[in-house]
Image (cartoon, rainbow, N blue to C red):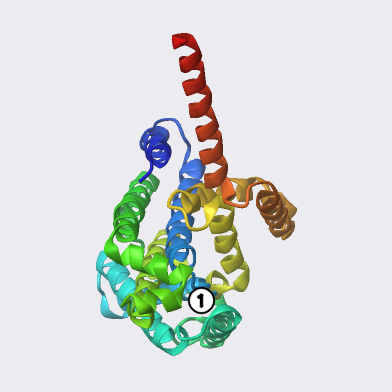
Amino acid sequence: MEQLDKKIVLGLLLIALILPLFANEYTLHIVILACFYVILSSSWNLLAGYSGQVSFAHLALSSLGAYTSGLVSLKLGIPPVFSILIGAIAAGIVGIIIGILTLRMSGSYLALTTIAFSEIYRIVISLEYEITKGQVGLSVPGLFGEAGSKITYYYTAIALVVIVVFVGIQKLVQSDFGLTIRAIREDETAAAAMGAKVVRHKVIVFAISSAIAGLAGAFLAHYTLLVSPEMATITEMGIVISMSVIGGLGTFIGPILGGVSLELISEYVKEFGNYHLMIFGLILVLVMRFSPTGLAGLLVSLYTRKRKAKQLSQIRKEA
C-alpha cells in the first residue's frame, strides 16, 4: 500500500473507532451502509479495475448471498453468523458457473450477458412468492438476534471492511496472483504467451469477487432484517459502479473513498427522490472531466505537488 493510502486508511479507521462516542444512531446507520458499499465497490473493483472484466451481475450475486443466508437461517435454524458464510459460498459458486460460461467473452458481450443474468434473477425472485416472498421481501433474523445494538452492528461492519478490504483484497492484489490478473487486463495474448492461464485466472477472480459480494449482501440482510428484489436492480448496480469509478477504478483506496463519499452524499440528496441518480451522474461526469483517475488520483496529484513544493522549499533554505 502506498504511503498516501496508508495515511488515508489510518485516518478513516481512527475516525471510525471514535465516531460512536459522539454520533447518534442515524449517523451510525449511514456508516454501516457505507461499509456495505465499500465492500461491494472494492470487490467490483477487484473484478473490473484489476482484471478488466466489467460485470453487471454483482448486485444480483450480492442479493443471492442475502437470500441464501436468510433462507438457510430461517428454514434450517442455522445461526446467521454461519449462514452469512454459506451465503458467500453460494454466491461464489454461482460466480464460478457464470465465469465458466461467460469469461471467454469480453467487452460488450460479457456486459450484456451479465445484465441478462441479473435481470432474469431479479424477475425470478420478484415473481416467486413461496420461497422469496416476491415483492414483499423476505424477513430474516438479525445477526445478533434481538439483543443486537446499533453499535454492535457498527463495529461488526468496520471489522468486515478491515478483514475483507484492508487484509483480503489488499493481500490478493499485491500477490503473484494479483500481478497476473493485472497482466491479463493489460494484454491477454501477452499474458497467455508468458504462461498465464487466462480463463482460469478470470474465473477465480470472478468467484472471489462474487463471494465477497455475497458476504456483503448477507450481512446487510441480517442487519436490515429484510431482503427484497430492489437489492438486485440495475440502478443499484449503477450506484456501485459510480462509487468505484468516482473513487478511482484500479486503485486500492478508490472504492473506499467512492463508497464513503457517495453514500454520505446520497443521504443529503434523498429529498430529491430519483433525481439523486442524476446528481450521481453529474458528479461522475465532472470527476471524469477534471480527474479521470477519480478521487484517488486527485489526492495523489495534490499530495505529490505538496511534497515537491516542500522539497523545493527545503532546497532553497539549504542553498
State the image coordinates of residue 239 (x, y, percent, origin top left): 59, 61
> What residue is shown at x 31% (from left), y 80% (from top)?
75
Count neighbours of disc 1 (C-alpha within 10 A) and say few if under 14, some if 14 to 19, many if 20 or more. many
Element at label 1: loop
Relative depth, front residue between 181 and 128: 181
* Quarter holding residue 212: bottom left
- In the visual, does 275 lie left or right of 237? right
Q: How many marks?
A: 1
Task: Confirm whether residue 140 shows in the render.
Answer: no
> What residue is shown at x 46% (from left), y 35% (from top)?
23
Relative depth, front residue between 133 and 9: 9
Task: Confirm whether residue 252 shows in the render.
Answer: yes
Relative depth, front residue between 272 and 142: 272
Mark 1: amino acid: Ala
* Quarter holding residue 170: bottom left
> What residue is shown at x 38% (from left), y 38% (from top)?
3
Relative depth, front residue between 266 and 152: 266
> What residue is shown at x 43% (from left), y 52% (from top)?
252
Q: Is residue 309 above or below residue 185?
A: above
Q: Which residue is mark 1?
A: 57
State the image coordinates of residue 117 (x, y, percent, origin top left): 53, 85
Q: Is residue 167 above or below residue 86?
A: above
State the image coordinates of residue 111 (x, y, percent, origin top left): 57, 79
Q: Is residue 308 above or below residue 245?
A: above
- In the visual, does 107 lie left or right of 48? right
State the image coordinates of residue 175 (x, y, percent, origin top left): 28, 60
- In the visual, does 305 lie left or right of 213? right
